[in-house]
Image (cartoon, rainbow, N blue to C red):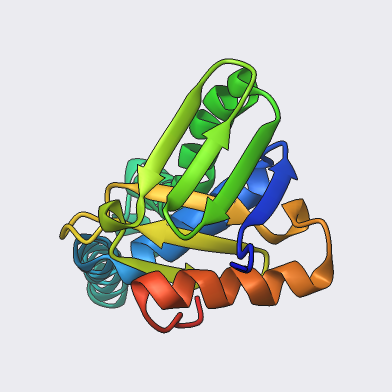
Amino acid sequence: MAVDMSVQLTYTVTWREISDGLKIQLRHSPVGRWCFRILWGLGAFLGFVIVANLLTRGVDAVGMGVWRFLLIACLLLAAFRWLMALALLGYARHLGEHRVTVNATGIRTVTARHTQETGWQFYGRCIEGRRVFVLLTPDVWGAGVMVLPKRGLAAPQDSDRLRELVAGHLGRLPAG
């Protein structure tokens, strides 16, 4: 007799879970890591230029426009992931409650508006975060993302079963 290794999740997506999934995607995809480094490098360079200007010319030499630009750039760097999550939340809420079944053949998602079945070969790896499991495609962009919130699991032991099932198909799960 075969043992049923399927795991069921039922949830309505929240902003926090999407934000966590995007954070993990940016940290674990090559393009995300490079973009993050470039943005912080540009921010550090801009800060260096402003400090050098202040030290050589004084506070009055820096116009109000430069301070506004620096403030806006810092806010956008900090809020980038949150704004993306907010944009995706509208779509996720439009779909309604998600009922996800993860089993040996892949992942089946059923909502009030659509049904989707994805085989394990679509995903290249899975990263486990504090609140979510994030499945990523193996491409350099990490464009294909599926976020599976842990709160959608029916029982605490389901988290271990899901971890075992995913690790069996995608390899060991690194921490997010």
Q: Is residue 88 above or below residue 129?
A: above
Looking at the image, residue 8 lies above or below residue 59: above
Q: Looking at the rendering, which quadrant does residue 55 occupy? A: bottom left
**Residue appearing at x 52%, y 20% in the figure:** 114
Q: Is residue 55 left or right of residue 165?
A: left
Q: Closer to the camera, 38 or 5?
A: 5
From the viewer's side, name the closer residue of 139 and 69.
Answer: 139
Which residue appears farthest toward the right when viewing the image? 155
Relative to 160, 30 lies left or right: left
* Image quadrant containing the N terminus: bottom right
**Point 45% across, 53% down: residue:** 22
The image position of residue 13, as x and y in percent, is 66, 39
Q: Residue furthest left?
A: 140
Count the labels in the image. 0
**Residue 143 picture location, percent across and down:** 27, 48
Q: Is residue 17 visible?
A: yes
Drawn side of residue 102 relative to residue 64, left or right: right
Closer-to-camera residue (157/135): 157
Whether residue 58 is visible, yes or no, is no
Residue drawn 50% across the image and 75% down it? 176
- Residue 92 is situated, as x and y percent measured from the top left of the image, at 57, 29
Q: Quadrant of residue 160?
A: bottom right
- Left or right: 151 in relation to 161: right
Residue 85 placed where, x, y %? 52, 41
Residue placed at 59% from the left, 22% from the top? 95
